[in-house]
Image (tube, grey):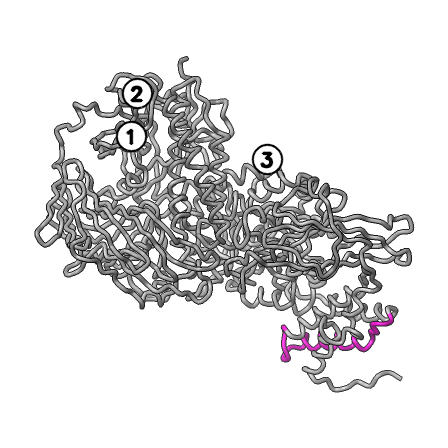
Amino acid sequence: MAAVPALKHWRTTLERVEKFVSPLYFTDCNLRGRLFGDSCPVAALSSFLTPERLPYQEAVQRDYSPAQVGDSFGPTWWTCWFRVELIIPEAWVGQEVHLCWESDGEGLIWRDGEPVQGLTKEGEKTSYVLTDKLGEGDPRNLTLYVEVACNGLLGAGKGTMIAAPDPEKTFQLSRAELAVFHRDVHKLLVDLELLLGIAKGLGENNQRSFQALYTANQMVNLCDPAQPQTFPVAQALACKFFSQRGGESQHTIHATGHCHIDTAWLWPFKETVRKCARSWATAVQLMQQNTEFIFACSQAQQLEWVKSRYPGLHARLQEFACRGQFVPVGGTWVEMDGNLPSGEAMVRQFLQGQNFFLQEFGKMCTEFWLPDTFGYSAQLPQIMRGCGIKRFLTQKLSWNLVNSFPHHTFFWEGLDGSQVLVHFPPGDSYGMQGNVDEVLKTVTNNRDKGRTNHSAFLFGFGDGGGGPTQTMLDRLKRLSNTDGLPRVQLSSPAQLFTALERDSGQLCTWVGELFLELHNGTYTTHAKLKRGNRECERILHDVELLSSLALARSAQFLYPAAQLQHLWRLLLLNQFHDVVTGSCIQLVAEEAMSHYEDIRSHGNTLLSTAAAALCAGEPGPEGLLIVNTLPWKRTEVLALPKPGGAHSLALVTVPSMGYAPVPTPTSLQPLLPQQPVFVVQETDGSVTLDNGIIRVKLDPTGRLMSLVLVVSGREAIAEGALGNQFVLFDDVPLYWDAWDVMDYHLETRKPVMGQAGTLAVGTEGGLRGSAWFLLQISPNSRLSQEVVLDVGCPYVRFHTEVHWHEAHKFLKVEFPARVRNPQATYEIQFGHLQRPTHYNTSWDWARFEVWSHRWMDLSEYGFGLALLNDCKYGASVQGSILSLSLLRAPKAPDASADMGRHEFTYALMPHKGSFQDAGVIHAAYDLNFPLLALPAPGPAPATTTWSAFSLSSSAVVLETVKQAESMPQNRTLVLRLYEAHGSHVDCWLHTSLPVQEAILCNLLEQPDPAGHLLLRDSRLKLTFSPFQVRSLLLVLHPPPN
């Protein structure tokens, strides 16, 4: 007799089904307990430990010792290799056989000399399919190798995920056996879990929810786990439910496999190489078994590592790329930070990345992919467009602490007006697992309902790698078109964006930066990394310029293209969003510092080589050449080396992007066109420095009492206030230590008070005047500073050395200005933008700490005050107080972050009129690009000065001169210029180089077919709109031998 229909209690029915699929409860009699059948131990297990990350060929040659399940191995960052010998029982013919492997270290299986699958408990990869159906003639004996790293998926934090790594951690092998896998049980489990998800997700007020729950309940009634012959009837019930279709208006979810791998973070760079192999070998296996599965992969650097370390795996990736299943995305060398790198460095991310993708996979990327960085510069849309990209995917703004970003799909308009189409996956994650609640959240959370009907759904374990699993794919395939849910299709980013573009007429536009309201401590953490970044950007700029000029003037000179590519790639690697930001472990920071050291040492060698070639036969008598790498003429005081290690000061004038000889001893002190610097110390201990342009008065402890612009007599420091005031704040965030500084830190402000009598005169005047002082910041930390004013210089410099030994403190320096404006201006990549100086709205208040590059400025009509720096990024202007963030002291994930000695310089520049007309932008460049005194061979006429390029407008900056990437044999240079004032301007570029032809090109150096420029009297006319970046190719005549 048929079972009598019974009343259903929602909770008991739901829990009944939950227990039927539970991995914890009733596994002796439920369905989950039948997922694996017969099992047997591995035939033999042996291992060896090594501190190195060995290649496979080397590892298999080592001596292995007997091992067993339960063994522990370590310590952290070591590797344990296992040789696993298997004998598959005869009785298992016709069955699916798995190797089941569980350990808390990340594993990689090698079979026949190739990596075939990653193994991670945290990434739900604990079994490897040896055969999906054991055949009569299949081999029964196999030997596999498992390479296990002594770290987890997210490193080896001591106690918490982001704590500094525990160096003595040990890891354990808890399972190693062969087992029969029941695929029919797996399918039923997927169906039942999805039905449960629908019932819970749609809730008790939804008809379809009850249909799902009743279907699941009926399946439990019909299915006897001990009798597989009952499974097909239960399966048929599920099929009937899932084949009921949704309507035509259903939202479409584009599900793309992804595996976000941080290029370094809580683990070192070298471990990332293996994370890529583990994750992508698994993805290859899934692509092979699921022809509709598409996997998106970013970061050229990671692919380059795999190419050199795992060539077989790289070849498979290329093969699946040809099939359209493996899709390179992003177009950049790494997923870089979106705030701190210079504009040129951002261009190089794309130049190196896109060229790599073209070379290795036959095409460039069409979408920029940066899901996890800490904010997005307003110049990114223009840079993207210049690199052939009009689409952008990210999701990090879902982490905003204060305001919810109003869109998931929108147009983003950059500083110059360039627009790109942006999509944030509405599920607010790049690591989905294909569950019903994630699918429903993607629809309900979408803030552009009615404007667009398509969303991205990125699935796969991320951050530490891992990627998608077969179970995730099975879930998503099952949900492809089911009534009550959105439509789900396995799709590529290109398919998603094509669908969004088709229906983009109603989308809104966001103008300006995408500011992340979180992680604003990363502008300051690990100050030495920030300094290395700024310094190495400068060195590479200078090397490229001098090498380009040497190429133009010397037939013998070989442009160091390969060395420069290597050095640029090191810098770009360090600009990964968890490295330059300082949010990485100590091992990573140390390696990044060694990358900077490589760039410095090789860069300086290349500079000397280029200088020697540039002026062969034309150096000054002392064998020194003074080089100006900026595109305007400069007159500055320079410390020249003397025999015996001493220095002498000289006033030198050097033409734009050119050189001048060292002044001869007779001309060392020319008749000064400007007033010399006067230095006076008063009886009360205060010191005044005056160069006729500005007058600086320091109180007896080194604070700034007065800063006067002499020509107008205008005071820049607020009445009754003191500038150059160091302040300490308590700096204890809610969780993300190296990342976050919270708004409440501002409530703990403590001025650091100096001791009168510590201020002394340094250099006594003439070409340079200075005063210096010592300051005890705390019992453990101290600071010394020299305040320097040079002849003819519009700003006063503060050379600072700090010995810093603090915990959870934040050091800043403040300058209260006698200026009022509700907006302050901050330099960003290729331009500048305004941010509020007040807290009117929550959007204003959330910007209590912002980022800036070389300068910030607070101006009112007719007057302003600019604060310049040579290696700092964190800043703020609140009311009329300009504040520069100097040092933090977080303890996780690197307990030693920022401890030790630091050197940096900032400068203060009062000015008449606008900062544009007053030359603030040029002054900040001058501070960051000192004149170079380079050794040159042999004596020569001491009168030769030479300039390669000059510009007719101060609004235009010639940022970069380099050799073209793709045309080394053609003697072609690339010039990159940008409009810096925010104006429409016509500009003449004058050059003394032998130019044959000039053509406009994009940022990837591809010529514009209509971009030929007329060269008249060695001059080119260029037209700019506000903040526009323009690039051109200059084809050179060969120089005479």
Alpha carbon of mark 2 to alpha carbon of mark 3: how far? 42 Å
Say if residue 586 shows up in the picture: yes
In the image, residue 513 sits, relative to residue 744, either above or below, namely above
Residue furthest top as drawn: 1041
**Front residue of 946 and 287:** 946
Residue extent of the magenta highlight: 201-227
Q: Residues within 10 Å of mark 1 (few under 14, many from 20)?
A: many
Alpha carbon of mark 3 to alpha carbon of mark 1: how far? 37 Å
Q: Amino acid at mark 2?
A: Pro
Alpha carbon of mark 1 to alpha carbon of mark 2: how far? 18 Å
In the image, residue 652 sits, relative to residue 852, either above or below, namely above
Indicate whether residue 735 is drawn in magenta: no
Q: Which residue is mark 2?
A: 619
* Location of residue 1015 in the rendering, given as x and y in whole percent from the top left corner: 36, 24
Q: Nearer the viewer, mark 2 or mark 3?
A: 2
Residue visible at 36% across and 39% down in the picture: 978
* Location of residue 129 in the rendering, given as x and y in whole percent from the top left corner: 77, 54
Q: Which residue is mark 3?
A: 359
Indicate whether residue 210 is drawn in magenta: yes
- Element type where label 2 sits in the image: loop
Q: Amino acid at mark 3?
A: Gln
Residue visible at 40% across and 54% down in the picture: 525
- Determine whether, in the image, residue 993 is placed left or right of residue 218: left
Query: Which quarter of the rendering shows the N terminus?
Result: bottom right
Q: Which residue is mark 1?
A: 656
* Location of residue 305 in the rendering, given as x and y in whole percent from the top left corner: 59, 41
Mark 2 and mark 3 in contact? Answer it, CB < 8 Å.
no
- Determine whether, in the image, residue 277 is placed left or right of residue 887: right
In the image, residue 553 sits, relative to residue 702, either above or below, namely above
In the image, residue 213 sits, relative to residue 878, either above or below, namely below
Q: Amino acid at mark 1?
A: Ser
Q: Of the residues under marks 1 and 2, which one precedes in the sequence?
A: 2
